[in-house]
Every structure is written in C-alpha cells, then in structure tokens.
Amino acid sequence: MKILIGSLFLVMSLSVYAFAGDGALSKPDVLEEESVAMTRGFSAYDTIIINNLDMDHAEYSRVDDEEKAKIESMKPMLNTIFTSTVAAELKKRGLFKDIKINVKPKGRELIYTASVNEFNAGSRALTMFIGFGSGKVNVIMTGKFIDAKTGKELASFKDQESGGFFGSQDLGGYEGKFPAFVGRIATLSTDFIEKLYK
C-alpha cells in the first residue's frame, strides 16, 4: 500500500512539475512579482521600444491637493528618468541592436511598457511616532514586455520602492524620492531584461 501511495505521489508531482514548467524561461528573481510566459530570450529581437510611463491611472496615497499638483508637474521628469535610464543601461550592457523611445512599432519588435500604479507621499508623523516602516514614501510600478507583431505578453513585473535613505544620503521628501525610486526600478528592470535576454 505504501509503495502504491508513494508511486501515485511521484506521478502527481511529476505531472504538476511538467505543467508548471511548460517550456517557459525561469523568472529572473530581480523584482518583487514576476511572470514569464516566453520560451525564447529577448535576444530574438533586434529592436526594443521603450514607451513613456503610464501615470494617468496612478493611485495617490497620503497626497493632498497641493502635493498632487507638484507630482503632476514632476511627471515629464519621471518619464525622462525612466526612459533614459533603461535606454542607457541597455546600451551599456550591449543588449539589442536598436533601442527606440516612444515610436510606433513597425514589425517584429519588443515593446516595453510600464505604469506607475501608486504614488505614496508618506507621512512624517507616522514615521516619527509609530515607526516600523509606517508612513514611508513609496512608488509601485508594473511593467510589461510585449511582442509588437502578435500583441502577446511575454513577461511582466510589479515592484515597489520605498524608504528614506539611499546609502548614507537622505533624499528628503517625496520630491527627491520619487525620481530616485523610478530610476531604481528602471535599473532593476534592465537587470530583469538582461537575465531574459539569452
């Protein structure tokens, strides 16, 4: 009986493993949440198109009207930080023959589109009086990599950057932290791309 149960368990384990594997590449394990559906690496593409951040649907947490107006005025800068950081990192690492920003796809290209899901301006009072990470400034972003020809989503991620210090430097309030957080996720997402490039 034990042998029969053991055999059944082994068969079930192997079938689950086979289903989970389904030929997709392994997750890079770089960002908080990752999904990979592709079976071939990004090196199959000569061109990557990096789109501007979609910030139109972002949730605003712990943000008053004055702060929201300031964040709105920061958006062009955040776009520049994101697209230029990803492009510069890809070029430095020798990934893709052509790196384009905000152009209409023409054929078999890889599209990288990312969104800011949440701007959280934090709360100094919560940070001072409660601590334990409460009241921290944070940004939540998602990214998707899409085959321009088929429209198929090949990989995606979701990541959150939060905190008050980068190394020994305090970046102050959200005005200093949002650009740093967007730049950090842009860099990490390039690590994600590099690990899926093979």
Image: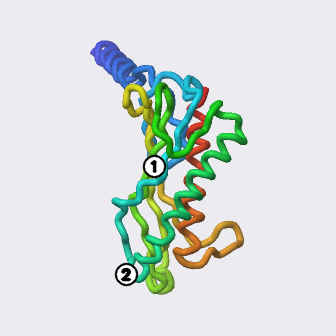
Name above or below for residue 143 compared with residue 176: above
The image quadrant of residue 94 is: top right
Q: How many marks?
A: 2
Q: Residue at x 37, y 31 (%)?
A: 151
Is 168 placed left or right of 30 in the picture?
A: right
Instruction: Kindly state the secondary structure of the residue where label 2 is placed.
Output: loop
Residue at the disc numbered 1: 114
The image quadrant of residue 180 is: bottom right
Q: Residue at x 43, y 79 (%)?
A: 67
Instruction: Kindly state the secondary structure of the residue where label 1 is placed.
Output: strand
Is 10 placed left or right of 195 in the picture?
A: left
Instruction: List x then y, in percent, for residue 34.
Output: 45, 42
* In the foreground, 164 or 69: 69
Residue at the disc numbered 2: 64
Q: Residue at x 69, y 67 (%)?
A: 167
Q: Residue at x 67, y 47 (%)?
A: 88
Instruction: List x then y, in percent, for residue 53.
Output: 46, 54
